[in-house]
Image (cartoon, rainbow, N blue to C red):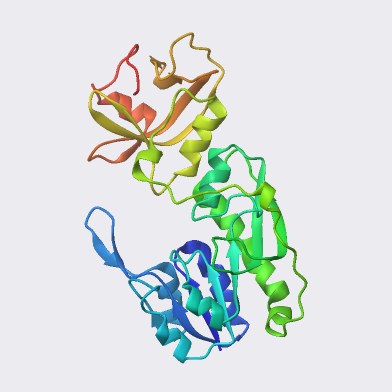
């Protein structure tokens, strides 16, 4: 029996492949249902929804570190994880072989936010690593890796979809060898390790003192679900889409120019044009629509 662990949309194509190919997935472990949206509707994870549609049993421990015995009692032959969202306890990993589909080219970007960090750092490429799991964050031996190019138009959602597809393909190509324990593996070079820790609220804020490519990468890495934010006059504004502008503002980073129904903002080395913006408590709007009815910002103001 296989136990699959995953939670967000990233995990869905990977689980679907296993179920469609009739691999013996006997249990799906996912995060507890959570409140979503303005109305805070309690919503099951995308992985739970898929599992239930296939009639697969679902387990949703609040803290896997204390609630793993149920899994051990099932005596699975393999655990497969893909963006599950909790650390697997040492006692579980010592008893059951486990592999992980990780959204980066390890050893780069170990941690819970590898896709976001690839965008934050304005990388030209990233990828997926199929790896063994050990009781150290994303430090297991690598089974196989695949690269994907990051396009100028990619944000977190589109890049996540690309990587999910690659992850599905990687697993599909290797699952039989893994089940037979006939695969090759390679150790990670510890000298090349970097981390992509789960993003804190305060880290969602835009730093206009950075170069344009990093400002844009920060916005892309948090779009469209979270939204990067900036502050002005004690109010938060979320920015969901932006692009590089050819207009040069000889101003301090964060300084605003409103021109031709556009919002332009100075960065360390150039200018960003904001395309989609959201004022607190309101809908996401295109800049043109936003400017029609706002009195919050004006030319010469500065985002903090």
| Residue appearing at x 56%, y 89% in the figure | 1
Left/right of residue 2 with respect to residue 42 in the rendered view: right
Left/right of residue 274 with respect to residue 163 in the rendered view: left
Spot the residue most to the top: 250
Instruction: Give how far across and how far down residue 228 sits, in percent.
Output: 40, 38
| Residue appearing at x 41%, y 21% in the figure | 262
Q: Nearer the viewer, residue 260 or 56?
A: 56
Is residue 154 in view from this perspective? no
Left/right of residue 72 with respect to residue 226 in the rendered view: right
Determine whether 212 is above or below 89 in the image: above
Instruction: Give how far across and how far down residue 38 sits, in percent.
Output: 24, 52
Q: Where on the picture, by quarter, is residue 270? A: top right
Instruction: Give how far across and how far down residue 136 sits, in percent.
Output: 55, 63
| Residue appearing at x 48%, y 50% in the figure | 197
- The mark tally for this picture is 0
Is residue 244 in view from this perspective? yes
* Quadrant of the drawing holding the C terminus: top left
| Residue appearing at x 56%, y 18% in the figure | 246
Q: Where on the picture, by quarter, is residue 130? A: bottom right
Q: Nearer the viewer, residue 142 or 89?
A: 89
Instruction: Give how far across and how far down residue 137 sits, in percent.
Output: 54, 60
């Amino acid at each position: 029996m296989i136990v699959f662990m995953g939670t967000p949309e990233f995990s869905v194509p990977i689980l679907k492949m296993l179920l469609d190919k009739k691999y013996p997935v006997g249990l799906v472990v996912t995060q507890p249902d959570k409140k979503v949206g303005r109305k805070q509707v309690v919503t099951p994870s995308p992985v739970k929804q898929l599992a239930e549609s296939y009639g697969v049993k679902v387990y949703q421990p609040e803290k896997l570190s204390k609630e793993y015995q149920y899994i051990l009692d099932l005596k699975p032959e393999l655990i497969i994880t893909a963006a599950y969202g909790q650390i697997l306890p040492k006692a579980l990993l010592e008893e059951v072989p486990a592999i992980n589909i990780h959204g980066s080219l390890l050893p780069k970007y170990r941690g819970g936010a590898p896709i976001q960090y690839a965008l934050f750092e304005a990388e030209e490429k990233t990828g997926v690593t199929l790896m063994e799991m050990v009781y150290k964050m994303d430090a297991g031996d690598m089974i196989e890796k695949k690269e994907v190019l990051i396009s100028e138009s990619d944000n977190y959602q589109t890049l996540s979809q690309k990587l999910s597809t690659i992850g599905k393909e990687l697993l599909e190509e290797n699952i039989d060898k893994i089940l037979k324990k006939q695969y090759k593996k390679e150790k990670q070079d510890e000298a090349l390790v970097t981390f992509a820790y789960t993003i804190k609220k305060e880290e969602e804020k835009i730093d206009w003192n950075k170069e344009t490519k990093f400002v844009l990468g920060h916005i892309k890495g948090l779009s469209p679900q979270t939204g990067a934010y900036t502050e002005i006059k004690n109010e938060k504004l979320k920015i969901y889409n932006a692009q590089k502008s050819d207009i040069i503002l000889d101003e301090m980073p964060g300084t605003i120019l409103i021109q031709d129904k556009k919002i332009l903002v100075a960065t360390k080395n150039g200018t960003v044009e904001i395309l989609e913006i959201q004022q607190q408590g309101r809908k996401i709007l295109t800049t043109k629509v936003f400017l029609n009815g706002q009195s919050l910002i004006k030319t010469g103001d500065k985002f903090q």
